[in-house]
Structures are given as structure tokens and as C-alpha cells.
Amino acid sequence: MTAAAERADGPLLLGVRHHGPGSARAVRAALDAAEPRVVLIEGPPEADGLVRLAADADMRPPVALLAHVVDEPGRSAFWPLAEFSPEWVAIRWAVGRGVPVRFMDLPAAHTLARREEEPDEPGPGRGDPIGTLAGAAGYDDPERWWEDVVEHRGASTDPFAPFEALGEAMGALCETPGSDGAGRDLLREAYMRLQVRAAQREFGAEGVAVVCGAWHVPALRHRTTVAADRALLKGLPKVKVDMTWVPWTHRRLARTSGYGAGIDSPGWYGHLFGAPDRPVERWLTKVARLLREEGRIVSSAHVIEAVRLADTLAAMRGRPLAGLTETLDAVRAVLCEGSDVPLALVHDRLVVGDVLGEVPESAPAVPLQRDLSRLQRKLRLKPEALEREVELDLRKETDAARSRLLHRLRLLGVGWGEPAQARGSTGTFRETWRLRWEPELSVRVAEAGVWGTTVAAAATAKAQADAVGAEALADVTALAERCLLAELKSALPVVMQVLADRAALDADVGHLAEALPALVRSLRYGDVRGTDTGALGEVALGLAERVCVGLPSACVGLDGEAAERMRGRVDAVHGAVGLLGSLGGSAALEQGPGDAVPGGGGCAHPSPSSRPRSTRECPTRPAGRLPTAGSGLRSRWLRVLRGLAEGERVVGGVRGRCARLLMDDGVMAEGEAARLMGLALSRGSEPGEAAAWIEGFVGGGAGGGMLLVHDERLLGLVDQWLTGVSAEAFVDVLPLLRRTFSAYEAGARRTLGELVRRGGAPAVAATGVPGFAQELDRDRADAVLPVVGLLLGLGGGGFGEADDRLKGGGVVYGGAGDGDGDTGWGGGRGDGRGNGSGGGKAAAVRGGGLAGVGR
């Protein structure tokens, strides 16, 4: 049946490929020629009231119709539309001419009412009709067949001819045995026929134009009775739904996103639809611009040669015009010099692309979405499809507000931003975020709308519910940390009450050890964010005390995997206890001068008198306030570590790690550490336990490589033990040893290999290898002190003053250069003296050789 004959007794059926620029141009030409009185489009009828927004100046595709169940927003569906989608072109054509537009697909109320059921079994051609037709034509690539048949088709005198040909092809596929359609498609097509009949009664048979997927054209031509169609639809389940427009992206239009009607190259199709002429030349110019921005040398001569090569390839392959395949081959050969690495960038940025659409503010939205949009405008955080990093300075009001928003959204499950590792700064006042807006986040916002109408209220309610429903103690402490980061003061009382109850009832030392670090980290936020962490300090001290009591017995009788986890917990608790002793918080009690903790532990503050200061001073706490419990806790923790390091029944990995922590803190002398290593590696020790002790003591993550390089006694003990291990035992301990030493830096491994090759540590000491000496060369060491003094701001413009303060081989711990006031950690061995003066807040240990500077 010709298009003219079809229009005489039925609607104009424009079968299209979703998101096809060739179909979009053909639809526009057909509508211009037919001038229908109503346009019916494949889509949910609930969106009829949203069509008017397509004419809004702030509506920029790609966009999507979002439908979700009112009482269950997670059950949702999208209908994406790009600038080159035939449906979007039809909508804009109709709205621009005042022609009514109606959606005629099965309502979303029925579609979303279907629960998870058995998937429909597509018949031949129904799953991918384009691929089936391409295979019948002898093409191995459906996209290439579509370009040759549709995209590269010249202008036709008959605007309806393409739809007639495509409809006949789909009719032939429908005649294939077993292709009578899946259950859901039968329901959709029955509803479409009812809507077409209703439009014909209202506007006349010749005044109706239908834009739908080409596969549905034969079903819409099929003559059925109204009663039969209604019988199919009778009794369908139904739910209440809301609909709105949401931004979409080219990347989410791609097949790789899981979208059923997706395409392989939305960016390329968008270019074909928007280019007024010479699409290949314009495309290769875009590619050249992108490669230049990435630092590659691309000249105009490269572009000219790439255009010639693309046209030549098209002629050799018998294609009417150069398509995406030819242009990418030309880009690889000419612009990328045969490399697939820059070609992958071209495919990601241009062939697919990161274009993000926009919707007007007048579009319907849940109250939470409106509040989020308001905050995004206020804080100048525009959603973007391309991932970008944002660095925030929490001392600035705007950046602090941005941080609060991102943390609150994470609590609500809206993963717009993910925390990233800050570059060049360890300060607590800096945050780095990776931001990327995905269309699915609109659904997450709708889901989170059940918790409140604003971001702050919703995050507070969600945090309180999560605290009550949390199962593990570590989950509650992590939640408390996130509440502090998000500054949810209203949620903290509930979270802290749950935390105190769970901590009192949980007797598992492992759970307590995992919960303590997050809790102690939270205590730091009071300085920069101005939040009250008073209740956290008491709970943290209680947890730390219970860990000290229960840890020794928990480190006995562990297998390899459990021992490794326990070693990580010991590391985490050690850092937490050190931080807890350096922070005031609610644990700070008014009292006089405090004594320094042995080995540099604790955070003691002096009285106004000129008493010696401790080895670690907290620059943020008012003078005269001392966390007595924190200082005593650190002393107790160091005793626990010593007991674990010397315990015979404690697993080897934990014993070795405890010994290393004590040595690094200056509590255990190197000679004593060597004695413990000798005991652990003695012939009476089981080889597996000895290897575990080595891993715990000189594990790669703890700088053990350089420790062995500079301590010949320890290297000699390891070498002596390893050469004495039997052949059978060596096979068993080899994987553990390889894991230990492979984690060292390449330079440390190379130096250790050279030392061993020369005959071991004693031989090295005797021969005097360059760079290694028996004693410290103090003249060479003192030569760097003026430079160190200038870096730390101690010199006041001259070298002499800084040299006086740093003389004596002492160790200097400076605050982070970004000015966050953090104080360095470490042992503090040395026989020099420092007077502690210098810019900002400073601390110096008389006779200890340690100066801590926080600028």
C-alpha cells in the first residue's frame, strides 16, 4: 500500500529508528508535506501535559521523560530523547505550529505495575530488527548498513518513500514464523490501535500522523476489532505514577549503558544531524581540536590528508559517503599515527560524548529536587556529565557549604560526588571531590524525597533511621563521622545514643578496634567545621580503654588471614590513640602542668610557668587544658604494645608489628628490637611464624626496606635466618617473604640486593661501601640545617638563627605547609636542643632535639 493510498483510509504511519538522525530528517520532511492536524508519538500518555515544555528556551536535549511510582520512587522508567531523535523532532514541529501532540504508548501506570517477571521472549527480528535486516543484506555491522541505507540517502522527491520501504521490510520480518510478538508488545500495540482510532474520530482519518518504532508499523496496519484490543488490556494492574523531564546524556544513550534502544555513537549521530554541510570535514576538525587540547601535534595538513583518506576508503568499500568507520580509520592512521590510545580518547569524547541536557525550572519535580536545584545554583555547583575534580577549602564559607551538601547527598544515597585523595596537602581543612552527574541520580533524589522536603531535613531523618537500623558498631561510628562531616547537628543525639548503647554491649575486640579510628577522626572536625564533638570524646576514650583490656587475648591463636586483619587493626588503633592523646575535645580537663608521656606520647600543655613542654603540642587547644585521660591512655597503650611484642603466644605478624611501632615511637631501642628479632628468628621458632614476624616488622607499607638498608644488624639477622631455613620450610615461607619484599620501592630492593651480593651486612660494614658508614657524619648532616630552617620559617631571613635552633642532630617536625596547624608525629630522638621560638604556634623539647612547628 502506498503512502497516498494509506492516508486515504488511515493515519500516516511514520516508522522510525529511535535516535536515528536520518529518520529525524525524514520525519520533519514528511510532516512538512502532510501537515497533519494531530501527531501521535510512541510514549506514555501521562506525559501529554509536559509536551509544552519542549518549546521552553531552557529545554536543551538530550532529555528524558521520567516516570516513577509515587509510593515507591525506585520503580521508575525513562524515555530518552536526543536532538536527533525522530520523536523529539516531531514534538518540536507540532509545538512550533500549534498542532496537538499526544503520546499513545501503554500508560506508565500499567508498565510500572509489572513486577519482576519472566522476560518476554523476542521472536526473530524483534530483538534487533536493524541487525536482522543488515544480516539479510550481507552486512556484518548494523550501524554501517543503516548509514548506507538511511543516513547517506540523498534527498527524495517523495518524503514518504523511506517510511514505505522500511514498513515493508518490517512487514516481511513479522511474517517470519515465531515472530508474532512478545506479550508486552502485544499489549502496547493494542493500546496504540485504540488511541489511533480515538484520534481519527476526533480529527479525521487523514489528519492523524503517527511516529513510532518501525517494528510496530505492521501491527498498527493490522485490522482488529475494538473489542479484541480492549479484551487484551482488561484487568491490567495499575499504580499511581508521577512524570517529569530530567536531563539525560549522550553516554546514557549508548548501548553500553544498558538502554535497550541505545545506539553505538550518539556523538557522531548528533554531529550528522547538526552539521549543515561537509560533515566529514567538520568532524575531523573537531577531532583535531580535541587532540590539540590533549597536547598532540596536529596541523591543518593532517586534517586535509585524513579527509582524503576517509573519502578514498569509502570509494574502495563501495559506500556512497564516508561513514564513521572510514573516519575513525583515517583518524587512527593520520592523526593518531597508528596508535589506539588517542583513538580511544576520540571515541570516548566525540563518538559517544558527555553532553548533558537541561530542563527548565518550571518542570514538575519533588520538593527535595527543587531544594537541591536551589542549592546547586546558590553554591555554583552545576551538574555536569563529564567527571571533574573540585578542591574545597573548608575555611571559606562557600566551600564549607559545598562540602556539607555533598556529604548530605552521600548520606541520602545520591552519589553525585565521591571523596578523592587530596593532592599536595594533608590538612583537615581541604577536601577533594570527583563530581559527575548521571541521569539515574534523579531517581535517587526522588527516592530520597520520602525522608524530607529539603536536603538537610532528609539527610537528618535518613541518618537517624540508619543509626537505629545499623547492625555493626563500626557502622554506627562511621555514620557518626559522616554526620559530623555533613554537620547534621539534629541527627547527632540519636546517633550518639545508639553508639553508646552498642559500644556498651559489644564485647568483640575486633569490632571495637574497627570502630575506634572513625570515631577519633571525627574529633578533628571540631577545629575546622566548628562542630561540637564533646560526646564523641567520652565514647572514644571508653572504646580505647576496652581495646587495651581485650586486645592481648584477642591476638592469640589466630590463623594467617585473621592475623593479617588483626595487624591492620593494631595499626589503626595505634594511630587513633596517638590522635586521641593530641586532641582536647570533651576529654580536656582543667589542670596544671602535665608530664610528658614516655617516648613522646600524649599531648601535654604547660602551665603559664616556664616548664618544659611535651614532645607533642596541640596548637588548637587553649592553654592550660590537658586531656589527662588521653595522656594516660597513650602510656597504657604503649605498655599493651610492649606486652604483645614480647608475648610468646601472640601470632608472629602482630608481635613484629608491635615491635616496629614501639621502635618508631622511640620507646624501644634499636638494640632491643634486634634482640626481639633474634628471638623470633631463632632456630627454635617455626619458619612460618618467623616469616610472619618479619612481615609485621619490616612490611613494605611501613618503610621496612629503608630500615633494613640502614640497620646492618637487622639485615644480618634476616639474612642469617633465611640462609638457615631448610629446603622444605623455605618453600612454605617463600610466598610470604615475596609479598613482604615485593612491596618495597625499587631503589630499596636494588640496594638490599647489592648489600646481600657483597656478602651480607657484616661484610658490607667492613668494606665500607660508599654511602654507608659506621657513624653519622655530623658535618654533612648540619649542612642542610639552614635550608630546613628556612623551609620551617625559623630563620627570620638569616641562616644563623635557624642553625642554632636545629643544631645537634635533632629531628624537626613541621606543620603542613598548607597552614592547617597539624602537628607532625614521630619519635623524636636526638641530643640537640631547641628553644621552640618561630612563626606561629611552636613546640620544642629541651634536650630532646625535637621542634614541632604549626604555622
Image: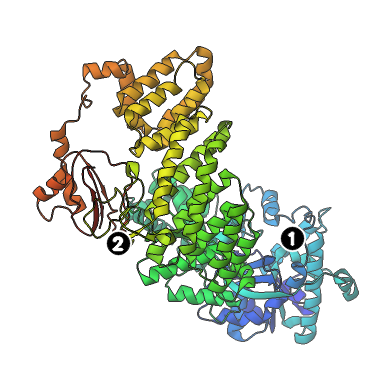
Q: Quadrant of residue 266?
A: bottom right
Type of amino acid under label 1: Met
- Residue at point 21% right, 20% down? 768
- Position above or below: 563 against 486: above
On residue 355, the disc is: none
Horizontal relation, residue 624 to residue 400: left or right: left
Residue bearing mark 1 = 170
Q: Is residue 727 left or right of residue 709?
A: right
Picture coordinates of residue 35, whole percent (x, y):
65, 82
Q: Which residue is the extreme one toward the front? A: 592
Marks 2 and 1, Cα distance to the nearest angstrom? 84 Å
Callout 2: helix, strand or loop?
Answer: loop
Q: Is residue 106 left or right of residue 774?
A: right
Q: In the image, what residue type sits under mark 2?
A: Ala
First in residue order: circle 2 vs circle 1:
1
Residue 248 location, quadrant: bottom right
Is residue 396 something one can see in this rendering? yes
Give the image location of residue 497, x and y in percent.
Answer: 58, 63
Residue that label 2 marks: 623
Is the image coloured rainbow, by chain, by secondary structure, or in one colour?
A: rainbow
The crowding category of the residue bearing disc 1, from other C-alpha atoms within 10 Å (few below 14, some 14 to 19, many at least 20), is: many
Please report contact status of discs 2 and 1: CB closer than 8 Å, yes or no.
no
